Image (tube, helix red, strand yellow):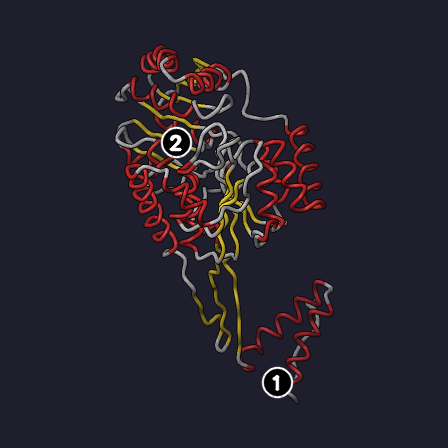
Amino acid sequence: MARDYLKKASLTAKSDATETHATVKQILDEIEAGGDAKALEYALEFDQYDGSVILSQQEIDAACAQVSEKLKADIRFAHDNVKRFAELQKSTVADVEMEIAPGFVAGQKAIPVDAAGCYVPGGRYSHIASAIMTVTTAKVAGCRHIAACSPPRPGKGVNPAIIYAAQYCGADKIIAMGGVQGVAAMTFGLFGLPKANILVGPGNQFVAEAKRILFGRVGIDMVAGPTDSLVLADKCADPHVVATDLVSQAEHGYNSPVWLVTDDHALAKKVMELVPGLIDDLPEMNRQNATAAWRDYAEVIVCADREEMAACSDDYAPEHLTVQAEDPDWWLNRLTCYGSLFLGEETTVSYGDKVAGTNHVLPTSGAAGYTGGLSVHKYMKIVTWQRSTREGSKDVAVATARISRLEGMEGHARAADVRLAKYFPGESFDLAAYE
């Protein structure tokens, strides 16, 4: 049975990449050439802010004093969950070595990058959770220096809760600067910061494009687009819960796709009936985002059975994937392409977005087909090493010389030859290229 689209998206989650690229490239080039002064010009233009860029401890303490004890407790709760999960992830990477051949040893080391730059959105929404997700994982990984950068609001500065979360989770410096200029400050080592080895964290299309342009010069967590979410639901799902979950993710932005995939026409129609009312009940800004996202980007797809549903989900490779269907273990074992998976009605993407412990910086726009989300591993370099006794190097050297000559790489061959001649004088070896 072909997939039946009860609702088809009229738009796809793609920004005007050409225009965005040109704008971001110009800003990055000007800031790199102009340094701190040019970054401050852009901060005044875009952030409408002329306060401290690198917050002093006194300013941090003053901001933290504005945060209620209840909110601080919730931030500490989220940090503890994220930290423990990151520590679990780190335990899966070990320094190892093995004897490849008698006397010849090769190994692996996991080394954290030196400096991490964490971008924390603070414009349309103040993403307190992003400070927790990015800074905590960098700290657990062992990064020597962690910078947290967040856009200040005119006349107010960075949201105090973001400042508290960044400091509590382990940021060494907190930067009051948003957008491309904030990313540039961390990358180019402005305002006395060390140059970042990796840039992480969500942001708007300009932040995402800046990271994409800078990738290679620095590491990044991923090239990100608008957030997206897919719900897999069968006849046993609660339509009101499904509809609420879709709306909760549509509020991210006007171009945030949400998709429902089901094998039950009645459920699909009921969800479509419920969504508009749930959107109308949101506060104004959230309502505007969710209305546009549902109207232009959402899809409702009916499939023949659960296997077709799973195949459809893997084709979309969603950032967030929710399963509200029977036999969750079947889905866990079958599904292969997603950023983070939420099994059963008892959990929801919102849990993962905020406090559950799994990271909310995840691959979007189908990237879950080839990569996972931010984790402690993203801040770590897996490097290799080798050493050998003279006797252990003999067979390796002979094979290296012959393969190198077959490839036409005589210099490589001679690097092996010279060791054979030094370590085994008087012995003869067949070092000619293969016939």
Which mark identifies residue 423? 1
| x then y, percent, for residue 168 | 38, 48
| x then y, percent, for residue 432 | 70, 73
Residue 414: which quarter of the image? bottom right
Please name whichever residue, 264 or 290, is drawn nearer the observer in this view of the structure.
290
In this picture, is 261 found above or below 35? above
| x then y, percent, for residue 408 | 74, 64
Instruction: Identify residue type, mark 2.
Output: Leu
Tag 2–tag 1 contact (CB < 8 Å): no
Q: Residue at x 60, y 51 (%)?
A: 189
Tell me, yes or no, if residue 132 can be seen here. Answer: no
**Mark 2 and mark 1: Cα distance apart in space:** 59 Å
In the rendered image, the quadrant that contains the N terminus is: top left
Q: Mark 1: few, some, or many residues within 10 Å (few <14, many ≥20)?
A: few
Instruction: Identify residue type, mark 1.
Output: Tyr
| x then y, percent, for residue 58 | 44, 48
Residue identified by numbered label 2: 321
In the rendered image, the quadrant that contains the C terminus is: bottom right
In this picture, is 163 found above or below 106? above
